[in-house]
Amino acid sequence: MKHIPDRLLRSLQRLVLIMLFGSTVWAQTTQPPIDAGHNDESTPVGTAAAAINGQSPFLGSVPTGKPSGTVISLSITDAIEQGLKYNLGLIESDVGTRTTRAERMRALSQLLPNVNASFSQEVQQIDLKAMGINFPGVPAVVGPFGVQDARGSLSQQVFDWSAVQSLRAASQRQKASHYTYQNSRDIVVLAVGNAYLRIIADAASVESQQAQVNTSQALYRQAVDRRVAGLAAQINETRAKVEAQTEQQRLIATRNQLAKDKLALGRIIGLPLGQQFTLTDTVPYAPLEGVTVEGALQDAYTHRADLLSAEAAVRAAELSRKAAVAERYPTVSTEATYGDIGPNLATSHGTVTFAATLNIPIFQGGRIKADVLQADAELQKKQAELANLRGQIDSEVRSALLDLNSARDLVNVGKSNLNLAAETLSQAKDRFAAGVTDNLEVVQAQESVATANQAYISSLYSFNIAKVELAKAAGVAERAVKDYLGGK
């Protein structure tokens, strides 16, 4: 070891490190900035990722139609509209809305008249003696004889305050379900925007990595030429070859990630199975001006569908408690029937009955008290959830703005750093070509360019997804995200 020059020893150490750890380090540093199925503290859209995390139905869809056999063009507007039609989470939310509509109709039916009609044909034979009728001259058995009865009936709850309050509560639950559906639409916009932006970032990474492969191959050929000419040692050629193969590995992994993320977008928006597509929007860097914390919070408290849903749920719980208390109140109901009865319809005669009933609850075995206690608990729960949601909205809006400002600064710094890294690489290549230094300096500069390029791509992705997250936090995702991202 004493006879090995220090520079050569450092070069050998560098080569070993690259061969052993180069691929691993790259795999850790070039992951897409956010994964639809995972979330951590480093992502700029924590609440968004939580909303569409794991096995969420918002990551699935109901695929429709057959693939066209050609590659279709897909803008971000097209992707959002497709997702709003076929996303599984939105379909399930619509089913929930229809369920609450059915519950309201059921509550309304308790207050509407019930009208029924019936027709019966009977043949009777009566044993009068068995009924205690036993008089001289009276036959013991009467019949058989026929009886026809055509009758209509009407019943109506004249006063039932508990049913009235239950109907009002059901109406509020239906309204809450409608707002939940609107919130689901915003989540779909968020999921589609996230998936679309990931593909754009992947495509940029592929393009950048292809450039790195081309550069590394050119440097390898230069190292071979210099070694053949006796101007450089064999280790320079070996080092350049390792770098070229490492860049090729990275390109393969990046292309694979792009293909997988395109599959994920197709699943979210319900494209036909196997349909190939390309993106038409590149979503370049465009600063978002004129957004303030106060304005965003005002929009959120006015437009957030989940907040409106929570407020409607509190009103529904309050009415449900009133309905439970009103179970102690008397109720008034009426019933009327009119019919035609006789041996046959030709010899029948009309009959009518009318009854009004006052029902006064006196002792119900504790059922009413239990209903009130349960309604109280549900009301307190909904009130706590509403208060928590207000605090969550404030946090989400402020966090989204912090992420937006931070990502904007990262884009500016990343662009500057990329230019400096490219300039350093150019100088290192010139120094190596002039024989001033070996290609270790070139390899290090090339790694710096790759790292700076990936950092810039990630920061641009983070900035754009932060704009989507801000639109979601302010409750205006569906109508604002296209403007925020510049989609057509």
Image (cartoon, rainbow, N blue to C red):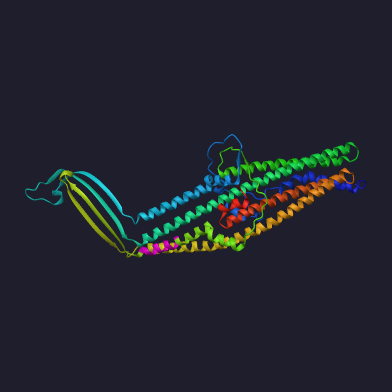
* Membership of 325 in magenta stretch: yes
**Quarter of the image holding residue 328?**
bottom left
The x, y position of residue 487, in whole percent, is 61, 48
Q: What x and y, as percent, mark residue 164? A: 37, 60
Q: Is residue 162 above or below residue 140?
A: below
Q: Can I make out residue 13 in this image?
A: no
Magenta stretch, main secondary structure class? helix
Q: Is residue 295 above or below residue 68?
A: below
Which of these two is toward me, 449 or 409? 409
Question: Taking the image as drawn, is residue 308 in sight?
Answer: yes
Q: Which residues are magenta?
A: 316-327
Residue 106 relative to residue 30: left or right: left
* Point 81% across, 39% down: residue: 218
**Residue 113, position as x, y percentages in the image:** 31, 54
Nearer to us in this view, 109 or 418: 418
Left or right: where 360 falls relative to 308: left
Compared across the picture, whether 174 is left or right of 185 comes to left
Answer with left or right where residue 185 lies relative to residue 357: right
Rendered residue at 38%/53% (across/down): 106
Q: Residue at x 83, y 40 (%)?
A: 238
Residue at the image point whose x is 15% and y is 45% from the top: 347
